[in-house]
Image (spheres, rainbow, N blue to C red):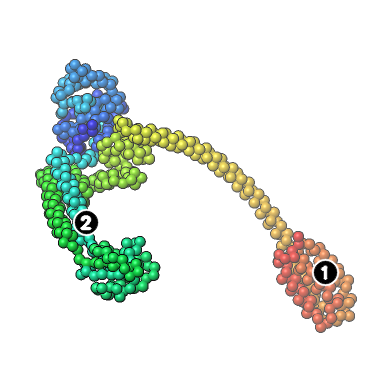
Amino acid sequence: MRKLRFVIHFLALLLITNCFTFPAFAESAESSIVNVNGSVIVVDGKPIAQDNDPISVSGTLLVQLKPIMTALNASFSWDDSSKTITGKKNKIEFRIQINSSSAILNGIKVSLPTPAIQMNGKIMIPLRFLTDTFGAQLKITPYPQMPTLTFDSKEIAYRKAYDDAVKTYNKFLNTYKTKQQALEKAKHAGAYTLQGQIFSLDPFAIYGRSTPQGSYSSSDPGFLIDNSYIVITNPDKKNIRYGKTYFGTHYYLGTESHNGTLLFVFGPQPKSTQKKIKEAEKAVNSSGNDVNTAKKAIATKKENLVSYVKNKYGTQLSSDPKNYIVLFKYAMHLDNLSVFLTDKNLQEMSNSSFDQAIKLDPVMKNYRSVYFSKADEWSKRKETLKKIATVDPYILLNTCFSDRDYYEAASVLSEVNTDLMEYALQKASISKNPEIITGIQKIRADVAAKIHAEEQNKQEEARQKELEQQEIENKKQEEEQQKQEADEKARELAKKNEQIRQIKQGFLDLMAKFEADFNSRYSSMSLAERAGLQSELQNTYLVPLSTYKGQVNKIAYGYFEDAINMVLTQPDNYMYVISDRIKFAKSWLDQDYGSPS
């Protein structure tokens, strides 16, 4: 049996309209925080599952006693004979008798805004009395309970009448189709078909043969007694002579003659057939009248049903046109009717009512998504519910009514909020459906595995972070060492470069001295005169040059050495070659190719 649930329209008004307050004895350090989110009560961040959801009675919110007392760390006892509750916490004690408008709080009689009651075997007590008594903070966030679609006895009767009318119509329609088929059969009895067309010509005769296909093949168009434009051939397309085929029933089979050729006589339907046709036409007309009558009955039953639903909600909305709960339920009802009656106009009216409800309360947009998702496959529906739960999980929970609703919500919340997931699972656990029971176990197992995996991931992340930190330290030390080594290499390189520079500079200075002597002296001397320069060239240039061997570019070295030796050997008119050798030596001095190994 579905649990009794009331639509809570304006829970926020409870804070204003509930003028009854009670002395608070609990110390502030022990103060709990109680949040009411529609049908979901959360105490100190933990949702509490109740067999009976909160109800509003005369503007006072009543909640199930046991779960809220347990959540507030209070104890209670029950005296069945006097129907009295005794609650205790620290130095606070109260007694409340069922249906009494007062309570005894630490020996003092206080008034209750609404008596405690019993509902479905559970005690329901004013929530504000408990929170004020124990010094708890109470915060109420209104969430309208999503309406459910129900049909009263009158509507059920209207729906049955419509359904019966449709069945009657279908029955008459099938009879009408059968009568039509009988009429067509009677009309075509004895008729013949020529190239797909039915003919009822005057009598004529054909000489021909019957074929295995049941048609008639003429042996010669000249034997056609009447309607000579008709030519008959075999329908199997073999030995086609005249291009046409006759399919039909003959009325008279003549005697065999003309070497096996038979005489076939065809003609209009006999009187017996015409009588059958008239009888069949009469039956069709009678059956058609039945169909039309049944069709009108459907329209009447449909109008009765639609009018009843419109008047039902119209009465409610006339007194409260901005009641978005009624508008939403009306929209659901019209949507259901549009499917039941296959009426697009009702669907448009349904969409309009949905839009009006959403304008009055945007939460209704999420409720509409939940409503329509019920027709979707689970994978698609789950995505819809998850989007809603991600924005506000309490919206999703306030759309739940059945064990399956809570089970599906738990499946979604397992990825969003495990505390609310557990709340939904407890609400779903009343189910006796094996599929849901198994599903609940799987959700819990999956979440446990996920939590375990997350814990392992955290540990692994911590270990990785420690390793990364150690790696950072090691890298710092390595970078510092590399920096020191790089600095040392830089110093050595600078020193080496300075040495190379000095060597190059000495080499260049030696070439400059030789070039100066060549330009001022050697170039103007004859080959015979230059022969006496051997000792000078040896001591002044070749011996100093040898000190640079292996330290400068070997090609530059070679060009310079050639230039010196050519002074003794180069003919007078080729002295310019020596100058070229000096230029080549200079150009090759800074090249990589041929540099000393």
User: Mark 1: few, some, or many residues within 10 Å (few <14, many ≥20)?
Assistant: some
Q: Is residue 260 left or right of residue 551?
A: left
What residue sits 26% from the left and 40% below the top? 399
The quadrant holding residue 512 is bottom right
Marker disc for residue 541? 1
Give the total of numbered labels. 2
User: Mark 2: few, some, or many residues within 10 Å (few <14, many ≥20)?
Assistant: some
Front-lying residue, 335 or 586: 335
Q: 260 above or below 157?
A: below
- As drawn, the residue found furthest toward the top would be 81
Q: Secondary structure at mark 2?
A: helix
Q: Position of residue 50 (x, y in %)?
A: 27, 30
Q: Are the two marked residues, 1 and 2, in contact with CB atoms closer than 8 angstroms?
A: no
Query: On the image, numbered disc 2 is attached to which residue?
Result: 181
Q: Is residue 561 left or right of residue 269?
A: right
Front-lying residue, 587 or 336: 336
Q: Position of residue 276 (x, y in %)?
A: 16, 57
**Of callouts 1 and 2, which one flags the residue occurring earlier in the amino acid sequence?**
2
Q: Secondary structure at mark 1?
A: helix
Q: Position of residue 220 (x, y in %)?
A: 33, 73
Q: 520 above or below 439?
A: below
Q: Position of residue 226 (x, y in %)?
A: 24, 73
What residue sits 34% from the left and 44% below the top? 378
Question: Which amino acid, by three-letter code, is at mark 2?
Answer: Gln
Q: Does the rendering let one see residue 420?
A: no
What residue sits 79% from the left and 72% below the top? 514
